[in-house]
Amino acid sequence: MSTEGSKQTKLLLIGETGTGKSSLGNFILKKNVFMACESPNSVTKKTDECSGKGDRSDVFVVDTPGLNDSNNFDNINIQNIIECVKKTGLQGIVLTMDFNNPRFSHSLKHLVKVISDVFQFEDIWKHVCIVWTRCYDCFPSFMIENSKIEKKKFKEEIIKFIKQTNKINENIDIEKDIPMYYVDSQLLDSVDSTRSEKDDDTRSEKDDSTRSEKEIKKLIEWAKKLKLIDKEEINKSINEFKEIEYEEKEEREIIEETKDTITYKITKYIRPKKIKYNEEFIYGEITETSSRTITEKKSNKKPKKSNWIVVGVIVLGVVVGAVVGGGIGGGIGAAVAAGAVINVAAGAAAGVGAIGGGVVGAIGGGTIFGFIGKKLLGDDKKKITDTK
Ligand SMILES: Nc1nc2c(ncn2[C@@H]2O[C@H](COP(=O)(O)OP(=O)(O)O)[C@@H](O)[C@H]2O)c(=O)[nH]1
Ligand SMILES: [Mg+2]
């Protein structure tokens, strides 16, 4: 189905911090609206959104806080992305990756897993493209062409992972789906936000012929053809569950033993526990997130039994207010995760969130993240059963 005739093409930017989401957003919209930063400490802290101008006035971009570059489940940022989709709906999802440093990181795997678990639309991954950022305009075209082979292998790896996450993702096609674009979004650096619209238009005329600009045009053409999954449809699809808890475990397998040493393959798995409003729950697909080998000196100690441990909680049943006040809410959430406790029940959070709006949204946000913080700190009376 096409959205021809609809007013806006919506793009949601996701990816790790520093991979160039905000710069790309500015480049797409042809204006400097999102803050792009050198320093990882001063990056986008909350979701930000804007329409473009000139021939991009029908494009609407949502810039999200980047995922942390760590092995931990980045609960607050992933929750923020989910809240944002609940608020704006979904059309094109743009995953940014650094052309010069391709990494299918832990945090990205967690995000992919959550998207698969939360948005159970059969063709959700057909809404995703990859933009390889920092693909500098000075790179010779033969170099970019050569690296496309390597980038395709990378895409294969992502698709393999997506297919593991959920059976409904079986029909992703490596050739047709998840198109990839190669962009240098640095051109706007010379444009400062105080310049007039006329000046910016001069820039767009001048740069329209660049490879990056052509790539963005292709990206927008691709996104325009995608069906808009509006917020009603999104919320309807996630109504069944109140929240999803993510549990992780590590398994050790002996692969070699000598007189003094022992070599293990350590594999990490994640599984979702989907919890309904009546507290019934079901487990979703178990997905492998990483594996490594280690060699240790032999000891008499018995290896510890591996257990599933809760590493994250994604709240589904709370209405969108959180994003509106995401900055403040996130802050409170972080404080709660760090040890402070806000004593508001989840049900109250739903009520407050439903009212939405700036300040109330902020309270909603704080409550959601506070709720998550409490859960992760183990202030949750519900027994977590181990089924494996
Ligand atoms: N030359 C060049 N620099 C880029 C590009 N994308 C991002 N950067 C730079 O990388 C840094 C981080 O970019 P930013 O957009 O803030 O990344 P975000 O954290 O994903 O939003 C900034 O200093 C940008 O100027 C690109 O395509 N080309
Ligand atoms: Mg940013």
Image (cartoon, rainbow, N blue to C red):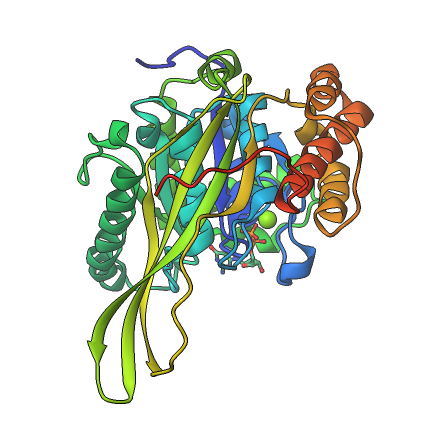
Q: Is residue 44 above or below residue 127?
A: below
Residue occupying the point 72% across, 24% down: 349
Find residue 77 and report its horizontal and vertical position in percent: 59, 43
Residue furthest bottom in the image: 260
106 or 158: nearer the eye? 106
Position of residue 277 measured from the top left corner of the image (x, y, whole percent): 55, 18
Residue 291 visible? The answer is: yes
Which quadrant would residue 65 be assigned to in this image?
A: top right
- Which x, y percent locates residue 262? 28, 79
Does residue 95 lie above or below 43 as drawn?
above
Left or right position of 144 against 296: left
Residue 54 seen in the figure: no
Q: Quadrant of the C terminus?
A: top left
Instruction: Give residue 236's position: percent from left, percent from top.
Output: 48, 12
Instruction: Please name whichever residue, 327 or 319, is drawn nearer the observer in this view of the structure.
Output: 319
Q: Residue at x 25, y 60 (%)?
A: 147
> Which corner quadrant holds the N terminus?
top left
Q: From the viewer's perspective, is residue 133 above or below residue 80? A: below
Q: In this view of the protein, which residue sits in the foreground, 249 or 305?
A: 305
Residue shown at 22%/51% (left/top)?
Answer: 152
Indicate the quadrant where residue 286 lies: top left
Q: On the picture, is 159 further left or further right than 7?
A: left
How many numbered marks have been drawn onto this rendered protein structure? 0
